[in-house]
Amino acid sequence: MQKIYIETSVVSYLTARPSKNIIIAGHQIVTKYFWDKLDISNTFISELVLQEASQGDAQASQIRLEAIEQLKKLEIDEECKTLAKILLKKKLYLINSLNMPCISPLHQFIIWMRLLLGILNT
């Protein structure tokens, strides 16, 4: 069974008010379709996703937290933090079209390490 890591932007697209921007609206529609097909028993978030989802408008953050409350949590230990610092220092993270990191290096580290170590593929 395939396991999936959910990043904060997925939760934001899922729970946000419908956008008037056609591209963002498309992301929201696809995200909602994806979420409806998701097997939450094989879906993970990190502590960082919980922290990010709880920020901002109180009502919006409550909706985001309710959407992810049943997902399994991956812990971030000292080894994760050390490797994330290395990734930042060496700039080993994805860049989007605006020349900005598209997901946090620590999130990417968690994804990569869990996959490399086989934790998400067991």
Image (spheres, rainbow, N blue to C red):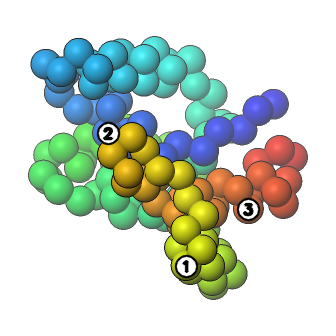
Circle 3 residue: 113
Q: Residue at x 84, y 60 (%)?
A: 117
Whichever of callouts 2 and 1 sits on the residue coming sooner in the sequence is 2
Q: Which mark is residue 19?
A: none
Residue 67 appears anywhere in the view: yes
Mark 3 is on which residue type? Met
Where is residue 52? Give x, y as percent: 34, 59
Query: Which of pointers 3 and 1 indicates the residue nearer the eye?
Result: 1
Q: Residue 23's image quarter?
A: top left
Count the numbered circles shown.
Answer: 3
Residues 119 and 92: in front is 92
Query: Which of pointers 2 and 1 indicates the residue nearer the eye?
Result: 1
Q: Residue at x 60, y 44 (%)?
A: 5
Mark 1 is on which residue type? Lys
Circle 2 residue: 12
Mark 3: few/some/many CA within 10 Å (<14, 14-19, 20+): some
Residues 105 and 95: in front is 95
Mark 2: few/some/many CA within 10 Å (<14, 14-19, 20+): some
Mark 1: few/some/many CA within 10 Å (<14, 14-19, 20+): few
Q: Is residue 81 above or below residue 105?
A: below
Q: Which mark is residue 89?
A: 1
Element under disc 1: helix
Whichever of callouts 3 and 2 sits on the residue coming sooner in the sequence is 2
Whichever of callouts 3 and 1 sits on the residue coming sooner in the sequence is 1
Q: Residue at x 77, y 52 (%)?
A: 115
Check the picture and name the quadrant holding the N terminus: top right
